[in-house]
Amino acid sequence: MDQKMNVYIWDMDETLILLKSLINGTYAEAFNGSKNVQTGVEIGKMWEDHILQICDDHFFYEQVENCNMPYLDVMKQYDDGRDLTDYDFSKDGFGPPCDDLNKRKLAYRHRSIEQKYKKGLHSILDQDMIKSWSELYDVTDSYTDMWFSAAKACLEQCAVGNRDLASSSGSAVATNDTIFQHVNILVTSGSLIPSLVKCLLFRLGDLIPSENVYSSWEVGKLQCFSWIKERFSGPNLQFCVIGDGWEECEAAESMRWPFVKIDPRPSSYHRFPGLTPKELGHYFSVVYGTETGSTNGHVSA
């Protein structure tokens, strides 16, 4: 069979989730009085509190805040595979200087973070915290007219396929003697650890595995896009970037990839709910010159 791949590269803030625009009130203000601005501000601040608490309590953020890396596996070469079951991260002396010993300690933390990410927040949060988190998600989804659940549904549809054939980084579906592989990648301008926590809090962890989360904070989005192109090198590849900012737009243009601009304002053309894999398929066809087909109502390349 022929193999083709669609790689969807997503921005996070103001694309898959809304947070900054809730906190500064710009999301509600765009609705000309039909949404309470202060409610949005309070919702956004509650999310900030959840994110910071989980980062600090479970993902070593206070220790690694000044060691932001573009992705978790970047430190894997320093990991000697030591059993971390009884390892005391609070007493291993991790910190400056950035020598091989401390790089190994950072690699241990990245491995622990990866394991926690795969298990999900239900494995580390108590029932009260889970209840509070779930209620806040539902309140936020309602306030944003189902933005969060619609974005998640779009990710699910982009990754449609036979999961028995799929790797952890994507899904595959066979049709007309061709195997289509669909992969969701996150490239965020935020720092890596809070971005991973956001993925879990906003229920995206099962759709975007930890190895597919990139932080452009230090290196820029063009560099991240270049790494992604190298990682998925081969024939019959199609990339599409979905985001709200100028940086991912310029980086996509440099790579000659289609770019879909998200705008949360109610009158905008691309937003959630509304954006679908079928619509993304039109952008693939314009740039790559191939008409996209559909499988079970979803886009294939």
Image: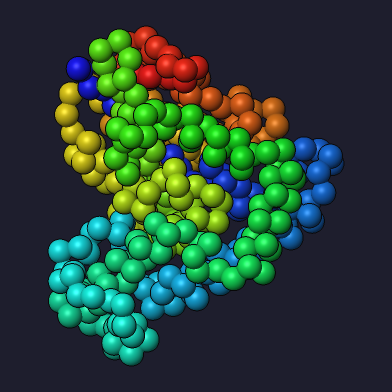
Q: Position of residue 138 (x, y in %)?
A: 70, 49
Q: Nearer the viewer, residue 57 or 13?
A: 57
- The answer to whether residue 67 is above or below residue 197 is below
Residue 75 relative to residue 213: left or right: left
Q: Position of residue 211 (x, y in %)?
A: 31, 51
Instruction: Please tell me which residue is depicted at 63% across the width and 31% down the height of the picture.
Output: 273
Quarter occupied by residue 196: bottom left
Residue 137 relative to residue 61: left or right: right
Residue 136 relative to residue 271: left or right: right
- The answer to whether residue 214 is above or below residue 98 is above
Instruction: Please tell me which residue is depicted at 41% across the width and 45% down the height of the picture.
Output: 208
Quarter occupied by residue 250: top left
Query: What residue occupies the far front of the structure in this picture?
Result: 164
Q: Is residue 34 visible?
A: yes
Q: Position of residue 41 (x, y in %)?
A: 72, 57
Q: Quadrant of the N terminus?
A: top left
Q: Position of residue 115 (x, y in %)?
A: 35, 63
